[in-house]
Amino acid sequence: MSYQVLARKYRPKSFETLVGQEHVVRALTHALEQQRLHHAYLFTGTRGVGKTTLSRILAKSLNCETGITAKPCGVCEACTAIDAGRFVDYIEMDAASNRGVDEMAQLLEQAVYAPSNARFKVYMIDEVHMLTNHAFNSMLKTLEEPPEHVKFILATTDPQKIPVTVLSRCLQFNLKQMPPGHIVGHLEDILGQENIEFDAPALRLLAQGAHGSMRDALSLTDQAIAYAAGKVTLDAVQGMLGALDQSYLIRVLDALAAKDGAGLLAVADEMATRSLSYNAALQDLGTLLHRLALAQTVPAALPDDVPEREDILRLAGLFDAEEIQLYYQIAVHGRNELSLAPDEYAGFSMTLLRMLAFRPGMGGAERAAQPPAPPVPARASGPAAAPASRTPMSAPVSASAAPVAAPARPAGISPARAALEAARNGGKSQPAVMPVRPAPSAPPAPSASLAPSASSSLPPWEEDMPAGRDAPAFDSLPVAAQKKTEVRPQPQFQAQSQSQPLLQSDTAVLEEPPIIVVPELPVADVQPLAPTPMPSLNWDGNWPVLAAALPLRGVVQQLAQQSELLQCEDKGEAVLMHLRIPLETLRSAGAVDKLTAALTEHFGKTVRVTTEIGAVQQTANAQAVAEREARQRQAEENLTRDPFVQTMMREFGATIVPGSIKPA
């Protein structure tokens, strides 16, 4: 006798031997026992889950010589003929090749005749969603009210393509995909009956490769038996399926635990030399990380037959739970982004390097054992020292009026670990960080306001400032420069919500804010040059107008329009111009040379330009800003004085939206 494949040889012949579809078996068994038979059934599900098998078992239950029963005998003429595929009154039709209205009309013509040698005539239409709309329409009437001796069994892998008019006339059963555990158990029974040696991990690989289809699992088992010469071994199944050797992934996790970037790239290079699939590697890495999480949280849920069980238990002790969750997320997203990478090697290696980059700096035990970080010593609240020629742009604020800074992150904890800790404690409310309101007090003495406070913390913007750039104390300034100016800061939290009225104590605090004495920095010795006409150059001496008129672009234009003319002298053979600029970045050699060339071309005479760094006042940019503000004020005044606008505001309560007025 010729060899029969396992999928056909071990096709279930009764409801008791059907695996993985208990919900369908239960419904059909009760319906047969109570004689509550529907005239049309629809079985849906992916390939190889038992749609055709259920159809044949149901046909045997309806036509068994022992009567309508949920347990057909399997030995009578009807049962054996249906199993052999030669029963006259059980008709299987493939809708993929018989999808037209003519084939459906022929089937319906035969359906009116009584069965020749059975109780019911059963029509099984496989892949029914392939029928045309005309074919569906032609069968609607018969499907709704068929003859009493006719039963329809429809099967499909895509129920969304079936018209709702057909779905409403059928009793629908959704067949589930087979869980890997059910597939492994069924394969063990079959291989035991066949007296074939097998490795349990190999069967799990076959179950994973079947993707929920029992028929695919049996076909793969047939292939594995032939590949390994009569037995099923792990090495043979891995080679046959092209499965990735898990040792590569174990080495990846070991390198992550050791923070070994070179080791990670070495694994990626070795996989490249063997032409292994990086997509499969990231998929298996996600599975391995899932098992690591199980080993940490629910050790009993880790299957005993996992080949890497010992390595998983060892690695579970090397990582924190949040680290594993982070690596799992990176692996899943890295697999999705693999098609967007320049090549698969770059995408895979960048995913591994991303895991290494976002790995927290230390484990949970080390962080718990580390003593708390000492408080950062406070520094003076004065601003950094500026050049003598630069005008100060901001005043220092007293430490008592500064808001309380958020607690600093402990040393050694990376931003990724901090984010994970915040996500894990997301349900716990954190105290809100509120700035401290200044208490009313007498104006402090200059020395008290300028002395460094022991309770003030380091501002965030000065955390990385080099030690050599500390600002000198105001006491070191010349006596002539220590002219005091009284500054009243704006009280904080004036715009409170109406639903949260200010407390009485808060109101008292806001009534009299403290007066902060701020010394003024010395003004530069060199004053800007007033416009003086220069007849020899045919120029009125107005530098801002000249800077705006020069045909310059880019950095050179910014250099001209943000500079201030301090000195201009015609030496006969050359014109000497000394400019002050606000930023060092503008004083590049190329920009100064291009500005010199433009001035030489404009005056028709050699021009030599020198520069210095300092605060500027009379510049082309400053004049442009002043003119723009003047036009804005004039436009607002013109609009508010308009009689029509005043009428709208007075009679209808109209308001002018701030910032909505644009000058012409």
Image (cartoon, rainbow, N blue to C red):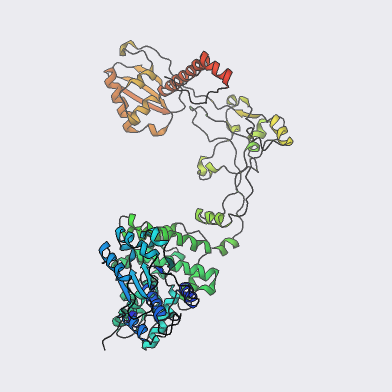
Question: Is there any visible trace of residue 149 in the rendered image?
Answer: yes
Question: Is there any visible trace of residue 274 in the rendered image?
Answer: no
Please identify the quarter of the rendering in which residue 150 is found: bottom left
Residue 70 or residue 601, whichever sits in front: 70
Identify the residue shown where x is 35% and y is 27%: 557
Residue 31 vs 662, above or below: the answer is below
Please identify the quarter of the rendering in which residue 138 is found: bottom left
Residue 480 or residue 121, whichever sits in front: 121
Residue 232 vs 523, above or below: the answer is below
Residue 31 or residue 327, whichever sits in front: 31
Q: Quadrant of the N terminus?
A: bottom left
Please identify the quarter of the rendering in which residue 538 is found: top left
Residue 329 vs 523, above or below: the answer is below
Instruction: Report x, y in % for residue 388.
Output: 50, 28
In the picture, measured across the screen, residue 607 lies left or right of residue 355, that is left
Identify the residue shown where x is 49% and y is 15%: 638
Residue 107 vs 577, above or below: the answer is below
Instruction: Report x, y in % for residue 55.
Output: 38, 74
Instruction: Report x, y in % for residue 319.
Output: 50, 66
